[in-house]
Amino acid sequence: MTATHVEEAASCLLPLPLDPAAELPLPLEDRRLDTPAMLVDLDIAEANIASMAAFARRSGLRLRPHLKTHKSLAMGRRQLAAGAVGLCAATVGEAAAFAAGGVTDLTLAYPVVGARKLERLAAVCRAADLTLVADSTAVADGYQEVARQAGRTLRVLIEVDTGMGRVGAMPDAAPGLARHLSGCHGLEFHGILTHAGQAHDAEGQLGIERVAREEAAIMGAVRADLERAGHEVAVVSAGSSLTARYLSAADGITEIRPGTYVFNDLRTLACWSCTYEEIAATMLATVVSVDGTRVAVDAGSKTLTTTTDPVYGQGHLLGRPDGAFTRLSEEHGVLRVDGAPRPRVGDRVRILPIHACVWSDLQPEVYGIRDGHVVERIRVDAFRRSL
């Protein structure tokens, strides 16, 4: 086998939808863009970024977007340029990828447990100004070794359960945990954090607002309890893409951490947190089979995920609510398309996301578009960084 053949074989290990040799801008119809390919309308995404940044300024809140939606330094830098104070990561791997890219003001909003993860965390803490999260003394105790290995004092936020029931200390446990943190070598209690993800299950827009107001009330009460116990609370971090706009500095909140807002999806649309025109992400796919109203495309569960929504099911085509998915298998998406014109084999269609955050984790590269042309290759720097 020649060197050229070896290079060609290696390139097939992680093929990219867009021909690496293609020059930009490139029309979406150009066949050098293969499918499935995740597209990001940059005009929409940049407007979403500017809108949330403006809201945070008006409300007296620091903005620390969650990077898990885009997992991309290119998009994170846009958020920072618009006024974000830093970014929020979900995993050690995400934090490491962004620290390596020069984004060093990071919060890792996940209790890190396990010897190998803690070793890797120490390396990130040496390179970045990383704030950690704990919801128990066991997690806090593990961070002491991280601080020793990193050779620095680490800030720690207590995660508070405000009703989601996933992780987080109960509100009345926060003062005791803060006291424990204050006695830990190399750790500094820095504040409190929560995620009211139960807003996705709330009934109606009023229900989401009620979740947000309860989130604010609980965090305000926890802050008051901590201050009465003699602890300084520098950070009160709350607010997702669903609840952030119902919060303000008057609630005692200092920071919001929305993530999905940068791209939006049908879940956020169903929860009244964006408009249809504010959905920036679509998946370009090719029709591979047609039989009457049944249309199959080359994007299945390994591309679109199995996430469903009570309103939108598994999603539909852009601009074609009559083209809705009936099922997904690993490499096939099957739709029922009732209206005209009906897609033909070889046609390209664009699919709206149910859950954009998972889409990004499945793509090594996505494509920024403007006016029907690919204008930017966007590397997904934290692609598959689930560890």
Image: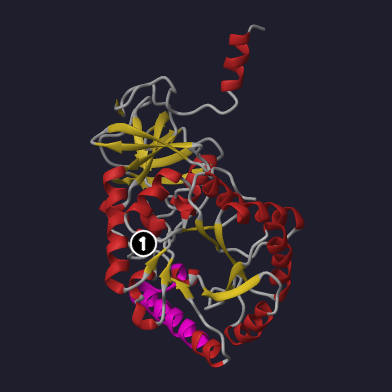
Is most of the magenta stretch helix, strand or loop? Answer: helix
Nearer-the-camera pick, 68 or 336: 68
Asked if residue 153 can be seen in this view, the reply is yes
Q: Position of residue 177 (x, y in %)?
A: 65, 81
Q: Is residue 299 magenta?
A: no
Q: Residue at x 59, y 55 (%)?
A: 91
| Residue plotted at (33% across, 23% down) | 30
The picture quadrant where one finds residue 341 is: top left
The extreme right residue here reads 115
Q: Quadrant of residue 65?
A: bottom left
Judging depth in this view, the residue of 172 and 226 nearest the camera is 226
- Per the image, label 1 sits on a secondary structure element best described as helix
Question: What colour scheme has been applied to the protein in the rendered image?
Answer: secondary structure
| Amino acid marked by disc 1 | Ala
**Residue placed furthest toward the bottom:** 228
Percent x, y of residue 97: 55, 46
Q: Is residue 96 left or right of residue 265?
A: right
Q: Is residue 203 magenta?
A: yes
Q: Which residue is most to the left?
A: 371
Can residue 264 be seen? Answer: no
Q: Is residue 252 left or right of residue 49?
A: right
- Which range of residues does the magenta coloring cover? 200-222
Q: Residue 352: image x %, image y %?
A: 37, 46
Residue furthest front as drawn: 151
Q: In the image, is residue 321 above or below residue 64? A: above
Residue identifier under label 1: 270
Give the class, few, some or many, for how many residues have Cα within 10 Å of label 1's Cα (few <14, many ≥20). Answer: some
Q: Write the residue at 51% across / 73% down.
A: 194
From the top left corner, tell me how far across and down residue 161 is, in percent: 56, 77
In the rendered image, the quadrant that contains the N terminus is: top right
Q: Is residue 221 above or below residue 136?
A: below
